[in-house]
Image (spheres, rainbow, N blue to C red):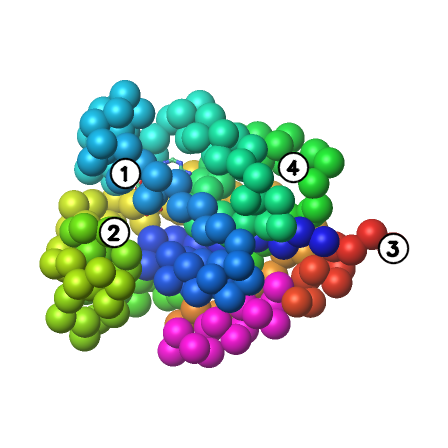
Amino acid sequence: MALNLIMLGPPGAGKGTQAEAFAREQRIPRISTGDMLREAVQAGTPVGLAARSRMDEGALVSDDVIIALVRERLERPDTRPGFVLDGFPRTVAQAGALDALMVGRDPLVVVEMVVPTEVLVRRVLGRRICSRCGANAGPADPACAKCGGVLVQRSDDSERVVRERLAVYERDTRPLVAYYRYRPTFRTVDGHRPPDEVAAAIRDAVASAVTMGRPS
Ligand code: AMP
């Protein structure tokens, strides 16, 4: 059975870090729409040009653009054994489109990461990414652990933009909890713990959800 996982949670919940570790462990791709958009911005593609100002303001990029990106990505054969979606879906329209894309594939497992708001703001303001490869850095890393690149703050990680992104999460993305909550493959994980403990909790949550999702 393919492991088709969604990591759901506000900015700063640790989705990126956990999605990356989990995907590596399971040997399945991590699909981050935020990373795909940042790459498009850097490359100056039409999608990047359209997305840039929305991202800088902390607003969402249009559903049509994002759904097209994800549709194309999920068609690639490396997603057959499964995938970890990080940062998608973010609206009910995106979740509906994803359900349509999943017809004929194994059920989605949804893990919601819960972290108190004041912790989210603190985490986001403190985080750094690699200016070269885009990897997330640990709080004490002097340079990128993967490629040695210089660490920088993401352009949308300023306090004003972070507060806007949290408000957008509450308004547009929080409704996804209600959208998925009653599926037998929905799980909630406490993300306000050391990363290793969160990773173990995600592993357990996914293992129990996969059992529920198996056809009887
Ligand atoms: P992230 O790296 O997931 O925090 O995404 C950074 C920014 O990219 C967000 O603040 C949005 O502007 C945009 N973005 C990423 N994923 C989506 C999505 N699924 N829907 C709309 N906008 C998105």
Q: Name the residue under label 2.
A: 134
* Local crowd size for mark 2, using a 10 Å CA cut-off: few (<14), some (14–19), many (≥20): some
Q: Name the residue under label 4.
A: 102
Q: Does the residue labelled 2 lie within 8 Å of ligand 1?
A: no
Say what amino acid the circle numbered 1 marks: Glu
Element under disc 4: loop
First in sequence: mark 1 vs mark 4? 1
First in sequence: mark 2 vs mark 1? 1
Q: Give the range drawn in magenta.
A: 194-206
**Cα distance in 3D space between marks 1 and 4:** 25 Å
Percent coordinates x, y for residue 76 in the rendering: 53, 36
Q: Name the residue under label 1.
A: 39
Element under disc 2: loop
Say what amino acid the circle numbered 3 marks: Ser
Q: Does the magenta stretch include residue 196?
A: yes
Element under disc 3: loop
Give the image quadrant in which the ligand numbered 1 is located.
Answer: top left
Front of the two marks 4 and 2: 2
* Local crowd size for mark 3, using a 10 Å CA cut-off: few (<14), some (14–19), many (≥20): few
Q: Determine which of the numbered discs, if any, sits on residue 216 in the image.
A: 3
Percent coordinates x, y for residue 117 in the rendering: 33, 61
**Cα distance in 3D space between marks 2 and 1:** 9 Å
Query: Considering depth in this image, is 212 or 142 the residue closer to the camera?
Result: 142
